[in-house]
Image (cartoon, rainbow, N blue to C red):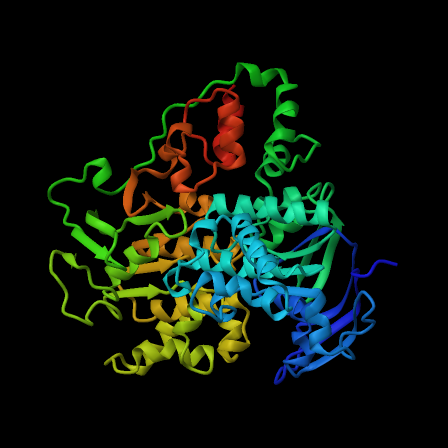
Amino acid sequence: MSHHFVKIENLSYTYPGRSEPTLKNVSLDVPDGSVMLITGPTGCGKSTLMKCLSGIIPHESGGVMTGRVQIGHLKDTRRADIHSITEKVGLVFQNPDEQIFTSIVRDEVAFGPENRGLPESVTESLIAEALASVGLAEALDRRTDELSGGQKQRVVIAGQLAVGHDILCMDEPFSQMDPRGAAALRDALGLLARDHNKTIILVEHRVHEVAGFADRVVIMENGEIILDMDAARAFDDLSVYNRLGLNVPQSAELFARMGFKERPLDVSDALPLLRENGRVKNIKPPPADKEPCAGNSTGHGSRDKPKIGIENITFYYNKTEPLFENLSLDIFPGERVAVMGANGCGKTTLLLLVAGLLKPRRGRVLYDGVVPKPGAVLGSRAGFLLQNPDLMLIRETVIEELRFPLRNSRVPREKMDVMVRSSLDVMMIEPLKNDYCFALSRGQRLRTAVASLLTPDPDIILLDEPTMGQDRNNISEMMDHFERMGKTLLFSTHDLATAVCHATRLLVMKKGCIHYDGTPKNYFTPSLFTPECALVPCDVMKIAWNMGVDAPVATVNDFISIWSGA
């Protein structure tokens, strides 16, 4: 029998203070050297399951746990000490800030090997190898508090890789990574499983980005497992994914929508199958995309005044090299502007400058043509979601959190209740209104933070990575609400689908400069995808390019419209 297999039998768990269990009779077998992908709607119990595997539950959590988790020779983790469990199992948390202990990247990655008493030469080799595998080899001597959220995520993963656990549990490890960084991590994890017999257990909403290298797919709903299947067959029937609002590989969705029986998980499998169909060789591009893009990139009339004006901003984090130098940008009323680019390119900094939480060395930010007074931006004027939403939650319960922004307003109690109910409904957290904020899943906490900033009804919404921990239904409902309300929206994201489907304008940043500013779909041509921007074309783009389609293709619907017209 292998020394690091994982077996879960009839596992149930109820958090302290709750009457309903979060996990209900979960059973799983995870073979050695396999990659298991676990997905499901926000709040279904995925993160709780990871805590059970790592020993945090029950040893550090309290609550009631029944059933059994077996890790190799540890027959029952409830009866094993936490040290024995963590010797075998590494855990990457959802929030990297909760897992970083030191101020320098080198020291952070060295923390595990040094605590194992490894020689310095071995430790240095492990540090270099781990950072290279996550695309951060050049960051060895950087301060951890100067990193972007995605870079912090990579450092935490590198730290776990350097330890060399037999089993690696990762809770949304790709959520803050740019697509190229995510691709590098997929390759590294695949190598660990194939060549080093490591067992990888992933919780992830970005199913379409990781399904191709998983061996099995598990779907959870309301604390239970409702699907457990080999990855090659897990997408034969997409109805459960559609019902739960989960992402699926684009190639599989494309084939399902076109009525084919095959479900390829990547482009290399999809292209030969498509080319076998005679209609494909006569495919013609549709007319050029006519989608309007409100903004200066499409020639706003002179009567339109910018809602947000950024004038010749220069900003330094250190004295050696400016992140922004003479950056100018206008954002107009009602625009929904997506900001994309590599980790560390300046997306979060741009949002912090617009929010007034950072001050530029030179230049200025204007709201409706006026420089606002210090401290007068956030609140009723603008709402801002930090990349780490936990930093924004300061009250005990959800309902208290939503009422808090109105505490000093002159809004009548009746209207206040209406505003709070509206935010609860929009963010789909009404059933959670009396729950403690930090008893929620990370995705639910993010939606609570967004609901809180929406309650005062600000003119401008600023969101830093609002898709983290969210399933497709939650993202669509949130973005559709902003469109209906006509709010001016500026948000950073690594999610191509969200940018294409919900933004009126796309900014792609490259090392503190704006590389592209225009209609989202018009960006998606081969010449504009440069390595510096760290964006990776999605499956339907690659398929269209391989077939010689010149018009912008960014979604399954785009491709099907071409297919139908061929």
Q: Quadrant of residue 307?
A: bottom left
Please tell me which residue is depicted at 54% across the width and 63% down the height of the picture: 110
Foreground residue among 313 and 254: 313
Q: Is residue 362 left or right of residue 146?
A: left
Foreground residue among 121 and 485: 121
Q: Quadrant of residue 15?
A: bottom right
Please state the horizontal and vertical placement of residue 314, each as a whole percent of the image: 19, 53
Residue 459 at least partly seen: no
Q: Quadrant of the N terminus?
A: bottom right
Residue positioned most to the right: 1
Foreground residue among 314 and 63: 314
In this rendering, the answer to whether 232 lies above or below 116 is above
Please tell me which residue is depicted at 57% across the width and 38% down the height of the picture: 250
Please state the horizontal and vertical placement of residue 426, each as a whole percent of the image: 43, 63
Q: Is residue 190 left or right of residue 42?
A: right
In this rendering, the answer to whether 216 lies above or below 275 is below
Residue 276 at least partly seen: yes
Please state the horizontal and vertical placement of residue 516, each as a whole percent of the image: 30, 38
Q: Is residue 518 left or right of residue 79?
A: left
Please state the horizontal and vertical placement of residue 216, each as a whole percent of the image: 72, 49
Please tell me which residue is depicted at 43% across the width and 54% down the height of the picture: 139
